[in-house]
């Protein structure tokens, strides 16, 4: 969500200890994929028992690996979506008492020139004795062939700039190279199998169309300091038939979505290497949402283990489609 996937990657939890909230709710990462949220059926989970889940899902013929995921022609529509954020639930000894905010997700481009995302999230997080605000701005572009990716983001906490990231990545035959200019000048060489955010969304849609249920591959989206790779586990639920699961958000009575297929999707993000070598692993966070075949997402759920934030689609605008030449 990059569609929402990317956007959401930018959301990181830094829960406060009692009486000590420093406002570290989000790091500067392109929440691009926010969208890409996790919605149900594939309802997100706070603690993922990887050994059990993989044993059940990866043994199934419906599992799709990065290299064999069916990449059918997927038409992603340019659109501007607004999501209203609120606290859904807390767990354990979480000190979070309220979350308020909004995400503006402005997606454009086409399958010839590539895809752009202008993303902004303004959030207010309340703990027992303090209120902190976070304002995240992110801009990304991903080539139509999913081989090039540029990213920039700034994150303000209580009106103070705390993170600034700027860089570009390119996937080659043997490696994925990353050139960072912010926060520090740095050159990285990552695994060639790394997937960028829009391709992640396209693969999830293609898997849903093919009746596949699981995707597993590393994702790079310029998160945090721009040098982090996440191992991801994406679970796609059964297709939701039109006119079922009635809802009251901005997608409810949109005629352009009336006959568009959608799926419940859950994505769990692990720090690279965290999900291997042990029987259990807890994801850094998980996102859930309903993903339409055209790339629009609704019913966001952002799970940070000790608290969960929901995003209700309050506004949806279809932008003009720029034809390929």
Image (cartoon, rainbow, N blue to C red):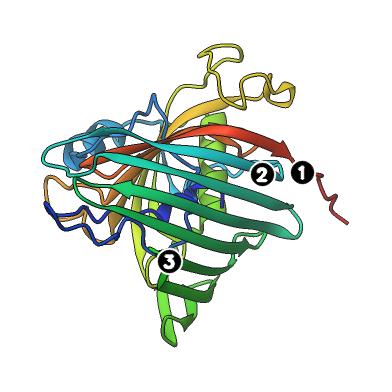
Sequence-first tag of 1 and 3: 3
Screen quadrant of the C terminus: bottom right
- Graded by Cα atoms within 10 Å as few (under 14), some (14 to 19) or many (20 or more), the crowding at tag 1 reads few
- Name the spot of residue 11 as percent of width and height, x first: 38, 53
Asked whether 154 or 222 is in front, the reply is 154
Q: Are marks 1 and 2 in contact (CB under 8 Å)?
A: yes
Sequence-first tag of 1 and 2: 2
As measured in the structure, the alpha-carbon distance from the residue carrying label 3 to the one carrying label 2 is: 25 Å
Pointer 3 residue:
159
As measured in the structure, the alpha-carbon distance from the residue carrying label 1 to the one carrying label 2 is: 7 Å
Which residue is at a point 19% across and 39% down the rendered structure image? 47
Which residue is at a point 61% across and 24% down the rendered structure image? 261
For residue 80, the mark is 2
- Graded by Cα atoms within 10 Å as few (under 14), some (14 to 19) or many (20 or more), the crowding at tag 2 reads some
Of tags 3 and 2, the one toward the viewer is 3
Q: Is residue 30 above or below residue 151?
A: above
Which residue is at a point 57% across and 32% down the rendered structure image? 314
In the rendered view, does 177 fall on the left or right side of 133?
A: right
- The answer to whether residue 226 is visible is no
- Name the spot of residue 280 as percent of width and height, x first: 13, 45
Pointer 1 residue:
319
Of tags 1 and 3, the one toward the viewer is 3
Q: Is residue 13 above or below residue 174?
A: above
For residue 141, the mark is none
């Amino acid at each position: 969500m990059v569609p929402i996937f990317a956007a959401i990657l930018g959301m990181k939890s830094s829960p406060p200890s009692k009486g000590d909230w420093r406002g570290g709710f989000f790091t500067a990462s392109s929440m691009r994929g926010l969208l890409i949220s996790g919605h149900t059926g594939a309802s997100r989970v706070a603690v993922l028992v990887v050994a059990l889940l993989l044993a059940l899902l990866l043994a199934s013929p419906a599992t799709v690996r990065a290299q064999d995921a069916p990449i059918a022609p997927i038409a992603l529509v340019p659109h501007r979506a607004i999501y209203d954020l609120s606290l859904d639930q807390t767990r354990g000894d979480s000190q979070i008492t309220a979350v308020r905010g909004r995400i503006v997700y402005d997606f454009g481009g086409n399958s010839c020139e590539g895809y752009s995302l202008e993303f902004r999230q303004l959030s207010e997080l309340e703990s027992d004795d303090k209120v902190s605000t976070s304002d995240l701005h992110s801009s990304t572009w991903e080539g139509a062939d999913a081989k090039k990716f540029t990213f920039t983001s700034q994150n303000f906490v209580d009106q103070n700039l705390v993170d600034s990231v700027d860089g570009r990545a390119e996937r080659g035959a043997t490696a994925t190279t990353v050139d960072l200019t912010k926060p520090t000048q740095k050159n990285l060489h990552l695994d060639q199998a790394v997937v960028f955010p829009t391709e992640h969304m396209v693969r999830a849609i293609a898997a849903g169309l093919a009746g596949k249920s699981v995707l597993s591959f590393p994702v790079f989206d310029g998160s945090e300091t721009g040098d982090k790779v996440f191992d991801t586990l994406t679970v796609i639920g059964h297709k939701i038939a039109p006119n079922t699961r009635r809802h009251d958000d901005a997608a409810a009575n949109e005629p352009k979505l009336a006959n568009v297929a959608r799926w419940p999707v859950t994505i769990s993000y692990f720090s690279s290497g965290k999900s291997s070598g042990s029987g259990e692993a807890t994801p850094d966070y998980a996102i859930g949402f309903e993903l339409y075949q055209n790339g629009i997402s609704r019913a966001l759920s952002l799970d940070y283990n000790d608290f969960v934030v929901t995003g209700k689609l309050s506004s949806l605008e279809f932008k003009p489609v720029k034809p390929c030449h």
